[in-house]
Image (cartoon, grey):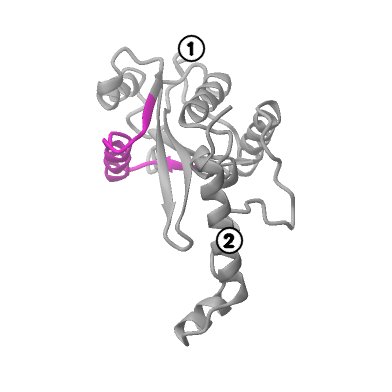
Amino acid sequence: MTAIKQVSVTTAGHASNLGKYLNDERALARGSQNLSNEEKWEAEMARTRAAYGHDAPSRAGAANTVMYHQVLGFNPDECSCNGGKMTPEKCMEYAKEYVSTRYPNQEAVWVLHQEHCAADGTDRYAVHIGINRTDLETGNRLNEGRSKNAKIERANAVRDMDRKHGLAQMREGERNSRVHARQPSRAEKEMAARGVRSDKSYMRDAIRASVSEVKAQPET
């Protein structure tokens, strides 16, 4: 089960911050689409928007979306850092397929990060994607329709890809990550503040040990 979320980039400050994040040297891997120079992707995307008049709002007084920032967050249970099948290479292949299928005419860049959850000490892989607004084939601005409908369509596209790649499907009303479910509840935090350890904390230690054993096993 892979999570997908999107944020519209509408200000120069937001675009600058996204650029710094996508250019961060801590990224595990990088990929791009429809760019002649991946290292200069920000300048190249800006030139494209300017050439098509997309560096300004389509109507006076409106916010101007210049890019979209999407995140593919992989289920911690399915990430190789927790003993799962999704290695960094497979995560990047997944991201490339997603972008090339859904946004074939857009300039795009994506980077893989290993993200850490401070609440429970677990890690997962996530791919952050920057998608330029200009459609290179039509010369129009990318328009996926109403926000709610587009969100559903993106979720359905990712669900179909998960099925194709043999990943777990999200189940309504259930915890969908055994690893990430180890985060302490409010009651457990209150117990910890009183110096009392809950039964779940012992269970988490056992699960961590089990994951470590799986990771230590040689590949066959």
Q: Position of residue 3 (x, y in %)?
A: 58, 43
Count of all numbered marks drawn on residues in the image: 2
- Alpha-carbon neighbours of circle 2 within 10 Å: few (<14), some, or many (≥20)? few
Q: Is residue 169 left or right of residue 134?
A: right
Residue under circle 2? 206
Q: Is residue 59 above or below residue 122?
A: above
Nearest the viewer among 38 and 80 is 80
Q: Residues within 10 Å of mark 1 (few under 14, many from 20)?
A: few
* SS type, badge 1: loop
Q: Is residue 66 left or right of residue 6?
A: left
Which mark's residue is nearer the viewer, 1 or 2?
Answer: 2
- List the residue tagged with mark 1: 137
If the image is split into quadrants, where does the C terminus sit? top right
Q: Secondary structure at mark 2?
A: helix
Q: Residue at x 59, y 45 (%)?
A: 77
Q: Which residues are magenta?
A: 6-30
The residue located at (62%, 74%) in the rendering is 199
Alpha carbons under labels 1 and 2: distance apart = 54 Å
Residue 97 is situated, as x and y percent measured from the top left of the image, at 55, 21
